[in-house]
C-alpha cells in the first residue's frame, strides 16, 4: 500500500472511533447470549443504515450479512465480527456495565461488532476506489453454539461468493493496546467439551464391598487421562485434557450410583485431536471396566476444529499491520493459543486468517483476561481494528 493511503486509513479510522465507542457501549449494556440476539441484530442494522450495502438477516439465527460492491471488478473479501456475550455476571463497575443479570460481554465481541461497523462505514465511503466486493459477517453464537457453521450452512459463501479471502479480529486485554499479533498455521486450538458418566451401584458407605463405588473410579480416570495425554500425544504437537468439574454423592454415609466428570479437550492439529479424543474414550471405558463400573463418554457440544491461518494470508496481515502501525506494534506469535474459535469453520473453506488486537487498559499492571468478570478494554484501540479490517479489504483491490 502506498504511504498516502496508509495515512488516510489511519485518519479515517480515528474519525470513526467516537460512533464505534457509542455502539460498543450500547451493546455492552445489553448483552445477549447464544444464537438469538434480536436487540444486537437491530443495533447493527441501525448502525449500518444509510450505507450503500445490501443487507440480509439469517433464516434461523439472528445473523446479519452486509454486502458492499465496489465500482470495479476484484476479489471478494469476507470480514467477520461475532456478536454474542457470555453467561456470567459483570463486576467491572463501568458506567455502561451490563444491565442484564447473568450476561456480560466479557470476550470483547461488542468491540468486534463496533469495529466491523466502523470498517463498513470507512469502506462504503471509499466505494469508488474499491475493486471487488466486501462481505461483512455479523455472527451470533460464537461461544459454544457454532454460529459461524450455521451461517455457512445458510449459504454465506455460496450466495455472496466466491469468497477469495477472509479476515477476523479478536481483541485481548492482556496484550498491549494497539498491538497486532498473529501467525501462520494454527493460531487457536480445537475445542471439544465432554461429559463422562461413571456408573456403579449405590449402597451403604460402611459396606463398599456390597456396592460398586464410582467415586474412586472417577478419580482414577482423572489421573489416567493426564497420563494418557503425556504418553500418547507427541510433545511437539500437544493436546490439553482438563477435567473441570466432578459431581457425585449427596451425603457422608451413602455410596452414590454415578459420578459425572466434565471437561474439555484442546489440540492444535487434527491428528493430536483424534489421539486425545480416542484416548479419552479408551481410558475412561477401561479404567471403569477394571473396577466393575461403566463409563459413558458423551460430547456435550459440537467441537470447534483447529483455527488454521493460511500462511500467506497471515503474513499479508502482518505486513499490512507493520505499514499501518509500525513494526514495534506487530508481533508474530511463536505459538498458538489453546482457546477455540468457530471462525475455524470459515478458514476450512476460505484462505484467510485471524489476528489478535491488544486492548490492555491504560495503567493496569495485570489486566483481567477475556472471560473474566472484570474484563475491561482500551476502547481507543478499536480505531486500529477498523483500519486493519479496511486495509485487508482494500489491499490489492484498491486502485492506488
Ligand atoms: Ni471471543
Image: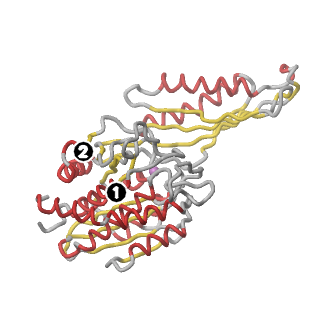
Would you say 170 lies left or right of 89 here?
left
Q: Quadrant of the C terminus?
A: bottom left
Element type where label 1 sits in the image? helix
Q: Residues within 10 Å of mark 1 (few under 14, many from 20)?
A: many
Tell me the residue at 63%/56% (across/down): 101
The x, y position of residue 323, in whole percent, is 17, 52
The x, y position of residue 383, in whole percent, is 30, 58
The residue carrying mark 1 is 382
Which quarter of the picture shows residue 79?
bottom left
- 323 or 138, nearer to the observer: 323
Please, is residue 58 above or below residue 106 in the view? below
Tell me the residue at 45%/27% (across/down): 233
Tell me the residue at 35%/70% (across/down): 160
Colour scheme in the image? Answer: secondary structure
Which quarter of the picture shows residue 217?
top right
Please, is residue 167 above or below residue 359 in the view? below
Would you say 304 lies left or right of 379 here?
right
The residue carrying mark 2 is 329
Would you say 157 lies left or right of 273 here?
left
Instruction: Kindly report the distance in space between the C-alpha atoms of the residues bearing marks 1 and 2.
Output: 14 Å
The x, y position of residue 119, in whole percent, is 31, 65
Dot label at residue 337: none
Q: Are marks 1 and 2 in contact (CB under 8 Å)?
A: no
Tell me the residue at 60%/59% (across/down): 100
- 372 or 398, nearer to the observer: 372
Q: Of the two numbered discs 1 and 2 on the same chain, state the one appearing first in sequence.
A: 2
Element type where label 2 sits in the image? helix
Please, is residue 391 above or below residue 72 in the view? above
Q: Residues within 10 Å of mark 2 (few under 14, many from 20)?
A: some
The x, y position of residue 226, in whole percent, is 54, 25
Q: Quadrant of the N terminus?
A: bottom left
- 40 or 335, nearer to the observer: 40
Amino acid at each position: 500500500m502506498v504511504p498516502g493511503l496508509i495515512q488516510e486509513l489511519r485518519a479515517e479510522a480515528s474519525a470513526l472511533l467516537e460512533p464505534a465507542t457509542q455502539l460498543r457501549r450500547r451493546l455492552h449494556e445489553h448483552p445477549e447470549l447464544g444464537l438469538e440476539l434480536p436487540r444486537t441484530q437491530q443495533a447493527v442494522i441501525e448502525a449500518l443504515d444509510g450505507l450503500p450495502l445490501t443487507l440480509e438477516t439469517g433464516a434461523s439465527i439472528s445473523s446479519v450479512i452486509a454486502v458492499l460492491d465496489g465500482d470495479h471488478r476484484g476479489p471478494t473479501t469476507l470480514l467477520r465480527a461475532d456478536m454474542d456475550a457470555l453467561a456470567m455476571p459483570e463486576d467491572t463497575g463501568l458506567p455502561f456495565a451490563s444491565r442484564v443479570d447473568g450476561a456480560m460481554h466479557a470476550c470483547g465481541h461488542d468491540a468486534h461488532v463496533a469495529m466491523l461497523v466502523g470498517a463498513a462505514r470507512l469502506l462504503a465511503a471509499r466505494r469508488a476506489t474499491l475493486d471487488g466486493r466486501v462481505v461483512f459477517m455479523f455472527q451470533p453464537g460464537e461461544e459454544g453454539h457454532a454460529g459461524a457453521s450455521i451461517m455457512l450452512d445458510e449459504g454465506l459463501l455460496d450466495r455472496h461468493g466466491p469468497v477469495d479471502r477472509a479476515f477476523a479480529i479478536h481483541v485481548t486485554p492482556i496484550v498491549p493496546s494497539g498491538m497486532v499479533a498473529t501467525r501462520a498455521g494454527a493460531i487457536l486450538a480445537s475445542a471439544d467439551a465432554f461429559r463422562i458418566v461413571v456408573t456403579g451401584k449405590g449402597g451403604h458407605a460402611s459396606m463398599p464391598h456390597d456396592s460398586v463405588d464410582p467415586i474412586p473410579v472417577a478419580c482414577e480416570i482423572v489421573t489416567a487421562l493426564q497420563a494418557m495425554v503425556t504418553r500418547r500425544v507427541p510433545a511437539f504437537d500437544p493436546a490439553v485434557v482438563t477435567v473441570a468439574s466432578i459431581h457425585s454423592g449427596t451425603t457422608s454415609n451413602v455410596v452414590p450410583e454415578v459420578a459425572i466428570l466434565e471437561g474439555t479437550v484442546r489440540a492444535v492439529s487434527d491428528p493430536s485431536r483424534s489421539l486425545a479424543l480416542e484416548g479419552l474414550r479408551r481410558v475412561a471405558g477401561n479404567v471403569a471396566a477394571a473396577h466393575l463400573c461403566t463409563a459413558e463418554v458423551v460430547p456435550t457440544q459440537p467441537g470447534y476444529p483447529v483455527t488454521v491461518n493460511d500462511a500467506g494470508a497471515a503474513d499479508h496481515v502482518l505486513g499490512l499491520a507493520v505499514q499501518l502501525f509500525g513494526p514495534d506494534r506487530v508481533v508474530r506469535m511463536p505459538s498458538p493459543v489453546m482457546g477455540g474459535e468457530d471462525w475455524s469453520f470459515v478458514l476450512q473453506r476460505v484462505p484467510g486468517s485471524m489476528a489478535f488486537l491488544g486492548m490492555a487498559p491504560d495503567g493496569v499492571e495485570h489486566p483481567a483476561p477475556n472471560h473474566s468478570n472484570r474484563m475491561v478494554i482500551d476502547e481507543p484501540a478499536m480505531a486500529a481494528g477498523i483500519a486493519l479490517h479496511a486495509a485487508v479489504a482494500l489491499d490489492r483491490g484498491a486502485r492506488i
